Amino acid sequence: MSSEVSINTIRNTLVQKLGKIHTLFIVDAAHEKAAWFNFGPETDTSIRKMWTRQVDFTGSEKRAARHA
């Protein structure tokens, strides 16, 4: 799916249709952003740490990352 609106706008729109047991995770890979809903505090913290972690590339991974 592609959209010109922000992932937060998409999340807020979809959340209105979800129930209390639903979870939602949206990734904007082009801009390295993520938005999520209803994962609980522990999972929220884990996602936040994982999403903001710097990745060190070496060797062929580094070359592939530069060309992506």
Image (tube, rainbow, N blue to C red):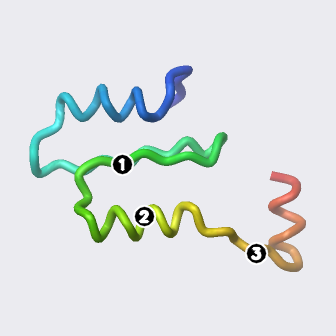
Closer to us: 57 or 50: 50
Mark 3, residue position: 56
Element class at badge 2: helix
Position of residue 35 measured from the top left corner of the image (x, y, whole percent): 42, 45
* Quarter residue 67 falls in: bottom right
Position of residue 29 measured from the top left corner of the image (x, y, whole percent): 60, 46
Mark 1, residue position: 36
Closer to us: 32 or 49: 49
The first of marks 2 and 3 along the sequence is: 2
- At a point 56% along the width and 46% down the height, the residue shown is 33
In the rendered image, the vertical position of residue 15 relative to residue 36, given as above or below: above
Q: How many marks?
A: 3
- At a point 31% along the width and 67% down the height, the residue shown is 43
- At a point 87% along the width and 57% down the height, the residue shown is 66
Mark 2, residue position: 47
Cα gap from disc 3 to disc 1, whole angstroms? 25 Å
> Amino acid type of disc 3?
Asp
> Amino acid type of disc 2?
Ile
> Amino acid type of disc 1?
Trp
- At a point 17% along the width and 48% down the height, the residue shown is 22
Give left or right: position of 11 versus 3: left
* Quarter residue 46 falls in: bottom left
Residue extending furthest toward the bottom: 59
* Quarter residue 54 falls in: bottom right
Element class at badge 1: strand
